[in-house]
Image (spheres, coloured by chain):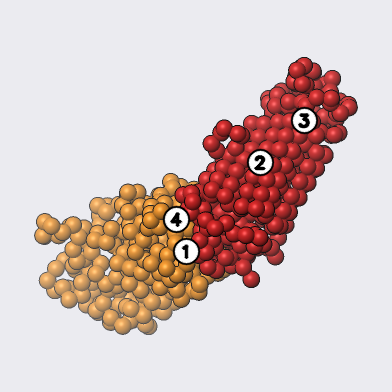
Chain colours: A red, B orange
């Protein structure tokens, strides 16, 4: 069986709410074609917006300029979704299991409130990657998010569990209000990393321009969990999977002491 | 049955069901892993008085351990799950948590999970942190030499305890030499431990006692100094009897270990003063697992 491929006929004029497609696994291709999607204030059938090919409804491929397609893979279970280009906002939001692979960029709130599975973004991710929606108290609760490019501001805001991996840079307030879990950034982070962090780990390859004043310097240490942690990433298509990029010697800053103060910023040490 | 001049008795060893788990201790080097493992398995020879039976199963190379450091695998056996969990936690807390550079990991996949680092984490007094890696939870407990890393749980499985055989020799040194050869061979077999000191027990016991408080007492039928005053099973030339007790994860594991051990003894032959191989048979009162010596050696 070949993956069910949905190719956009034209760039939508309004933003499209893609969440009905998250139930694709339980539907036939004909039923998927008949699904109605919100397009601005109107509803349109899937086959009015896309041409459909293939029959494996557990594997979806989205083609065309998908920047205006929001909520791709929202709350999906055991779906394998590939976006061959950019994705709109809320990509992978609340996903339970399976895989979402965005080959381009993802907009705001990608993987927000993710519960499980893997969200891979080959390009850049917008602000609030893996975060909580405004008003909600918990962000990502499980799974792995891998961004090969840069992540925007507030990456992992209120992250509860799981791993966010950023190969490039992360913006300001990276790991803000982190509850637990791990955010790893290979590039630079912006201002105020770990702002209001309660528990959890911000793992950095490069020293931030300024370590917030509410963090205590705990010195340099060799931590035994890091080799295990890196070994757990070996299955990924990522620089994080390369043993050459693994380390266990870190400078530890404990904090945020203005919050619960049980978390840490770990910076790779020589 | 006679092998190399040594008589193999037509009897069987009796063993009983136990619960078991395996823990992996790693450290900066093998020496420190052994320090920790020896302490953890100390005073764990017999469930009669120790609460559990434990031993070092084997050394692990860095490639075999979760954190890529040298380590040892430890097996712990107890009569029930509750007792096993208690012993594991007490021993891990006193002997692994305290041992420099150590880390503690689960050694059994599947089975019923029992706490490993799950409660030890509270030693961290709130500073402990957890990390979930590949579906498994680990606890990072801050300690004075850095961090003690412990996996949250390990698996508990059904197992068999009390497999055994007796070596009857013309002298004490000859009996001990035969035991040493047997234990060395049996250590090559996976999934088993010989929990007594050096793998050998000289105080083999029978079930019950004339004293009501005791549920086991000296196996007088195999005590050489009582040959003339009790219903002995020893011939005049036997001066020393030693027993090797084996706990294993399955009956088959104990079968293999007993065979390896008895073969090693038989290689020494009657010329080394070894006259008979027998087994602890308590008339079916001890347990449902029976290890017939002649079947094992057939």
Give me the disc on residue B39.
none
* Residue behind mark 4: B128
Chain letter belonging to callout 1 = B
Which sits earlier in the primary sequence, circle 1 or circle 4?
4
Q: Does the residue at mark 1 contact the one at mark 4 (Cβ under 8 Å)?
A: no
The nearer-to-camera label among 3 and 2 is 2
The nearer-to-camera label among 4 and 2 is 2
The residue lying at 35 percent from left, 52 percent from top is B85
* Residue behind mark 2: A128
Q: Looking at the image, which residue sits at the far front?
A: A213
* Residue behind mark 1: B147
Give the SS element for disc 3.
strand
Marks 1 and 4, Cα distance to the nearest angstrom? 9 Å
The residue lying at 57 percent from left, 56 percent from top is A212
Residue in front for this viewpoint, A110 or B132: A110
Is B100 left, or right, of B223 in this rendering?
right
């Amino acid at each position: 069986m070949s993956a069910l491929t949905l190719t956009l006929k034209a760039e939508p004029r309004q933003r499209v709410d893609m969440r009905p497609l998250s139930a694709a696994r339980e539907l036939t291709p004909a039923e998927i074609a008949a699904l109605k999607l919100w397009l601005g204030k109107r509803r349109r059938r899937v086959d009015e917006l896309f041409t459909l090919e293939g029959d494996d409804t557990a594997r979806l491929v989205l083609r065309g300029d998908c920047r205006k397609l929001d909520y791709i893979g929202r709350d999906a279970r055991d779906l394998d979704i590939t976006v061959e280009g950019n994705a709109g906002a809320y990509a992978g939001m609340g996903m339970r299991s399976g895989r979402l692979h965005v080959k381009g960029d993802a907009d705001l709130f990608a993987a927000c409130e993710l519960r499980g599975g893997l969200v891979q973004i080959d390009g850049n991710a917008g602000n609030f990657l893996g975060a909580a929606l405004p008003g909600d108290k918990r962000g990502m609760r499980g799974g792995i998010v891998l961004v090969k490019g840069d992540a925007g501001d507030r990456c992992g805001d209120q992250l509860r569990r799981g791993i966010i991996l950023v190969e490039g840079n992360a913006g300001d307030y990276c790991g803000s209000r982190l509850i637990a879990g791990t955010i790893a950034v290979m590039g630079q982070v912006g201002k105020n990393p770990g702002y209001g962090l309660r528990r959890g780990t911000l793992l950095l390859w490069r020293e931030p321009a300024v370590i917030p004043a509410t963090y205590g310097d705990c010195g340099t240490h060799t931590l035994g969990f890091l080799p295990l942690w890196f070994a757990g990433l070996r299955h990924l298509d990522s620089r994080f999977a390369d043993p050459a990029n693994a380390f266990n010697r870190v400078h530890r800053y404990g904090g945020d002491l203005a919050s619960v103060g049980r978390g840490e910023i770990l910076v790779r040490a020589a | 049955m006679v092998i190399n001049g040594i008589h193999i008795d037509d009897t069987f060893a009796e063993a009983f069901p136990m619960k078991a788990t395996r823990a992996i201790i790693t450290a900066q080097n093998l020496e420190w892993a052994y320090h920790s493992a020896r302490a953890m398995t100390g005073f764990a020879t017999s469930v009669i008085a120790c609460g559990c039976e434990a031993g070092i199963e084997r050394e692990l190379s860095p490639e075999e351990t979760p954190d890529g450091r040298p380590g040892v695998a430890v097996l712990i056996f107890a009569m029930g799950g509750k007792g096993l969990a208690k012993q594991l936690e007490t021993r891990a807390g006193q002997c692994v948590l305290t041992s420099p550079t150590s880390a503690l990991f689960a050694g059994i996949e599947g089975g019923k999970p029992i706490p490993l680092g799950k409660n030890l984490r509270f030693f961290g007094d709130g500073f402990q942190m957890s990390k979930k890696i590949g579906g498994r939870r680990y606890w990072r407990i801050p300690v004075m030499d850095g961090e003690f890393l412990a996996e949250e749980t390990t698996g508990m499985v059904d197992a068999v305890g009390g497999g055994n055989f007796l070596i009857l020799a013309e002298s004490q040194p000859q009996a001990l030499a035969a035991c040493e050869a047997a234990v060395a061979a049996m250590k090559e077999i996976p999934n088993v431990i010989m929990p007594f000191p050096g793998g050998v027990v000289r105080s083999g016991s029978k079930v019950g006692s004339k004293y009501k408080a005791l549920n086991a007492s000296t196996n007088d039928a195999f005590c050489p100094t009582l040959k003339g005053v009790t219903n002995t099973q020893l011939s005049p030339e036997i001066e020393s009897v030693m027993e090797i007790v084996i706990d294993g994860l399955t009956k088959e594991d104990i079968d293999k270990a007993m065979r390896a051990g008895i073969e090693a003894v038989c290689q020494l032959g009657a010329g080394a003063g070894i006259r008979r191989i027998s087994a602890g048979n308590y008339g079916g009162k001890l347990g449902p697992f029976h290890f017939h010596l002649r079947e094992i050696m057939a």
